[in-house]
């Protein structure tokens, strides 16, 4: 569960649109202005690969700008210019700024329908898509774990989150006198065994979470005994726990008149407000134009922006390709001064009417490039993805015909002019992309055996770069190569390791256990007997259960990481199992639970946060912002898992120990990669560190996040949801993929409600992570958490094969659940896997959606197979380049192969 204080951290994810509607309450106040960045590509000329200018003080806010070209001079007003032919460079960079708006969170206690019932109201007076993430404690609970409330206590539209919480959308208030826009009401009985209601507030629009002074809001419903720290007395009167909601503890005494209880029950029993600051994005832009002025100076550069406030350009020039900052000779613009003998700083002039500012910069001949960053309101730096803005000056080839990056109003596509001289530009493009994407070698050229192989590698590079910043290529450039024999072309296969942790692209994953597998006590041996069968079905990777000693029998509460004697078997049986899978051609993934760890002993305060075994950490290995376990480490870099101490991955000794442990597992057990548990709990950059050290063949993280809902109905647009998953993958630098929770959730609604139109996004692409970053998307319909005996988010019953018909024919890496493999679905799943392998469908295959309507979805993949799910009609066209033959069919699904 992600949490931040009431001064929230803005989660960095892609923004599709920014609400500009006026505030509906007089209490909203606009305050400070900051800049943030979007995870999109930034291509400016040849691109600045190093940032040589760094202010010694003040914080630097990264700003990604998406370059777009426009040869029209109408968008940019240049002083004293009359001949547009002299404009040799012009680009407009969209920027986005953070606008802070102040508001309130309210917590109110109202009377219920009778004396035994009360109503807790939580609200917010800021517009937005607010979600209450909440749970309860029972009177006999020991510890601080949340429980889900009983069904009768849940408001309409509530959605269960795993086993410990509920998410309920706040609805627009009809009580206009209070001025609050959104609120949710929770009814409860004062005689129940519930001792407390816990909650945090989440803003769906920004992904931010809001707590109370760094901890969860907690409204106790009982008097707490001070005699024993672990016991809760019998309920007497309702009271608010001191210290949790400020002076709410005395709310029952705030009424007028002598009989406080009687008077308060005639109206609101309590009312508290808490300050909140919501950050939203506002669109701005910056234009850079260069005009050749031989009668004055060689070039005149013009910068114009609509950013409000005081804008200063810190700038310099470079005279060679090193992009080293130098101070040019004069003349300089007005209001220019030298900054620490390293750069010039020029105040941009306010435009008439106060809407933005601009400035002119004369530049002499012999300059290779113009480098700059912006400083807004003297406290916020604006740069380009951590680098300087770089405008090349010397190579006119870049200016005569500006490169087109993107299309108007299309932020998720990137096109190249296929008529370019590819022999000249392809190497430059590949080198540029390789700078943006990890795992790709920096070699200038790669030799392969066939044109098909080269194009596959180029397609991978392009897609990784585009997908990493949520920009997608709609066309793949071709390049020249000497003719070669048809047989050589067909036999050639890509033999390059494109990047760590992503496999070959043709992987099919099998989850080799369910929630009850530990009860076997010899699961490793039982699974070993099934290895040959799994191989014959076409699986290439098996995901094995957590191997370590664990407080919970399933393995997800690890204790001693080096003790591999678990409920599934001992270490020797595990080694034998992995060896057997290797013999039959299947690689094995270990389930690495490294977000949290159960302690061996208590500290001086009686808190379990001291560890034993080979990794005998103390409480400095525990994050410092989880009050449940009183760690002395730094603040968590992700969401806290409440059931066990959350490990502080920012500690160097922790990372060192975990890297050694992962490498030991690779060598000692023979694991080929990892399934990473609860990766929302720690920064993806640490995952990159672990992946670089252990070098897995394949790795996938569990980033389970709630989808977007409005009043209990799933939103059509789930871009912000999949963006959060993509952001995590991007934080790992692409060293690990992630389970495509977005696709699973959309399949639920599409199949349950006959809303198959959901399976095509607004751009006509698959709506999940598989539509944005297919090579890192692991698609699934069920696992040990969502299905099995837990059933936290079970796939629609009887429609499982429609789900498999989708994920086994589409790009991404499909994962099949153990319970479905060894069931009556076995033969149908086997047939679909055979079709996938026979037609060489892989994680980056191309999808052309043919139909997405209420009762049917249909698509053609790689022009090799066609498929449809849903009761509606679809037949692939028999006229044209392909004839189609029915290869598989079942309950509301069909798959065809091209002849």
Image: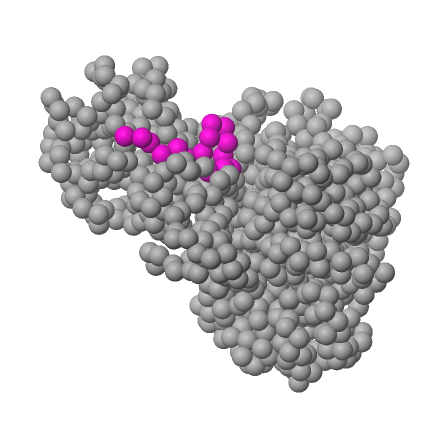
Give residue 870's position: percent from left, percent from top: 79, 41
The residue at 64%/78% (across/down) is: 583
Q: Nearer the viewer, residue 240 or 866?
A: 866
Give residue 568's position: percent from left, percent from top: 73, 76
Q: Is residue 302 above or below residue 696?
A: above
Query: Seen in the image, is 887 located left or right of residue 700?
Result: right
The residue at 47%/57% (across/down) is: 485
Counting every numbered tag in the picture gives 0
Query: Seen in the image, is 440 located left or right of residue 865?
Result: left
Give residue 148's position: percent from left, percent from top: 77, 52
* Residue range (magenta): 400-414
Q: Is residue 245 magenta?
A: no
The residue at 61%/61% (across/down) is: 507
Look at the image and tell me whether residue 143 can be seen: yes
Displayed quadrant of residue 228: bottom right
The residue at 55%/63% (across/down) is: 503
Displayed quadrant of residue 348: top left
Q: Nearer the viewer, residue 186 or 247?
A: 186
Query: Seen in the image, is 860 located left or right of residue 694?
Result: right
Displayed quadrant of residue 755: top right
């Amino acid at each position: 569960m992600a949490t931040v204080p009431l001064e929230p951290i803005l989660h960095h994810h892609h923004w599709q649109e920014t609400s500009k509607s006026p505030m509906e309450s007089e209490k909203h106040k606009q305050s400070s202005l900051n800049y943030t960045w979007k995870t999109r590509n930034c291509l400016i000329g040849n691109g600045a690969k190093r940032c040589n200018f760094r202010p010694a003080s003040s914080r630097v806010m990264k700003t990604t700008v998406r370059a777009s070209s426009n040869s029209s001079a109408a968008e940019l007003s240049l002083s004293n210019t009359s001949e547009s032919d002299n404009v040799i460079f012009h680009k407009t960079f969209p920027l986005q700024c953070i606008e802070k708006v102040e508001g309130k969170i309210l917590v109110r206690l109202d009377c219920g329908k009778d004396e035994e019932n009360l109503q807790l109201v939580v609200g917010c007076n800021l517009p937005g898509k607010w979600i209450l993430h909440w749970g309860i404690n029972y009177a006999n609970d020991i510890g601080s774990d949340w429980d889900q409330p009983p069904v009768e206590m849940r408001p309409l539209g509530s959605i269960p989150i795993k086993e410990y919480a509920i998410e309920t959308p706040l609805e627009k208030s009809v009580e206009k006198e209070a001025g609050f826009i959104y609120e949710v009401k929770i009814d409860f009985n004062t005689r129940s065994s519930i001792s407390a209601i816990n909650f945090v507030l989440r803003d769906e629009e920004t992904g931010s979470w809001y707590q109370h002074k760094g901890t969860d809001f907690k409204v106790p419903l009982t008097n707490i005994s001070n005699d024993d720290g672990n016991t809760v007395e019998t309920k007497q009167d309702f009271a608010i726990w001191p210290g949790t909601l400020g002076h709410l503890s005395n709310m029952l005494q705030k009424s007028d008149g002598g009989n406080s209880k009687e008077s308060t029950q005639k109206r609101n029993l309590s009312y508290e407000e808490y300050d909140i600051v919501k950050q939203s994005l506002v669109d701005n832009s910056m234009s850079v134009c260069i005009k050749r002025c031989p009668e004055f100076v060689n070039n005149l550069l013009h910068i114009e922006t609509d950013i409000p406030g005081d804008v200063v350009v810190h700038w310099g020039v470079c005279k060679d390709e090193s992009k080293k900052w130098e101070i040019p000779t004069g003349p300089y613009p007005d209001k220019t001064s030298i900054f620490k003998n390293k750069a010039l700083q020029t105040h941009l002039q306010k435009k008439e009417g106060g809407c933005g500012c601009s400035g002119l910069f004369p530049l002499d001949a012999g300059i290779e490039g113009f480098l700059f960053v912006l400083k807004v309101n003297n406290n916020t730096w604006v740069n380009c993805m951590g680098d300087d803005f770089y405008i090349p000056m010397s190579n006119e080839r870049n200016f005569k015909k500006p490169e087109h990056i993107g299309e108007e109003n299309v932020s998720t596509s990137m096109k190249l002019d296929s008529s370019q001289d590819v022999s000249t530009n392809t190497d430059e493009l590949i080198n540029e992309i390789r700078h943006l994407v990890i795992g790709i070698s920096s070699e200038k050229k790669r030799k392969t055996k066939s044109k098909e192989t080269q194009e596959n590698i180029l397609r991978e590079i392009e897609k990784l770069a585009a997908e990493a910043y949520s920009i997608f290529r709609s066309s793949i450039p071709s390049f020249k190569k000497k003719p070669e024999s048809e047989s050589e072309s067909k036999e050639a296969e890509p033999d390059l390791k494109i990047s760590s942790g992503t496999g070959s692209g043709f992987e099919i994953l099998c989850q080799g256990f369910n929630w009850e597998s530990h009860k076997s006590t010899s699961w490793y041996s039982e699974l070993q007997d099934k290895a040959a069968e799994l191989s014959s079905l076409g699986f290439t990777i098996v995901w094995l259960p957590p191997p370590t000693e664990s407080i919970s029998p399933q393995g997800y509460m690890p204790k001693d990481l080096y003790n591999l004697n678990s409920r599934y078997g001992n270490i020797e049986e595990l080694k034998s199992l992995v060896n057997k899978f290797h013999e039959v051609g299947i690689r094995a993934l270990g389930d690495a639970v490294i977000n949290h760890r159960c302690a061996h002993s208590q500290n001086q305060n009686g808190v379990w946060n001291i560890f034993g075994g080979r990794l005998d950490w103390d409480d400095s290995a525990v994050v410092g912002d989880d009050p449940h376990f009183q760690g002395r480490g730094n603040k968590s870099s992700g969401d806290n898992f409440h059931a066990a101490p959350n490990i502080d991955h920012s500690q160097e000794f922790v990372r060192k120990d975990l890297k050694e442990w992962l490498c030991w597992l690779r060598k000692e057990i023979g694991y080929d990669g990892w399934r990473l548990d609860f990766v929302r709990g720690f920064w993806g950059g640490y995952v990159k560190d672990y992946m670089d050290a252990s070098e897995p063949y394949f790795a996938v993280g569990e980033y389970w996040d709630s989808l977007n809902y409005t009043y209990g109905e799933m939103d059509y647009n789930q871009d912000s949801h999949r963006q959060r998953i993509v952001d995590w993958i991007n934080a790992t630098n692409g060293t690990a993929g992630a389970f495509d929770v977005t696709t699973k959730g959309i399949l639920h609604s599409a199949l349950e409600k006959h809303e198959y139109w959901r399976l095509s996004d607004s751009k006509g692409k698959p709506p999940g992570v598989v539509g944005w970053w297919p090579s890192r998307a692991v698609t699934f319909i069920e696992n040990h958490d969502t299905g099995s005996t837990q059933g936290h988010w079970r796939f629609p019953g009887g429609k499982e094969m429609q789900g498999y018909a989708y994920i086994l024919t589409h790009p991404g890496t499909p994962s099949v659940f153990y319970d479905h493999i060894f069931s009556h679905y076995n033969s149908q799943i086997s047939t679909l896997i055979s079709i996938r392998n026979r037609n060489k469908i892989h994680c980056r295959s191309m999808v052309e959606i043919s139909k997405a309507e209420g009762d049917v979805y249909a698509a053609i993949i790689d022009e090799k197979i066609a498929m449809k799910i849903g009761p509606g009609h679809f037949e692939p066209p028999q006229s044209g380049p392909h004839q189609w033959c029915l290869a598989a069919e079942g309950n509301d699904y069909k798959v065809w192969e091209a002849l």
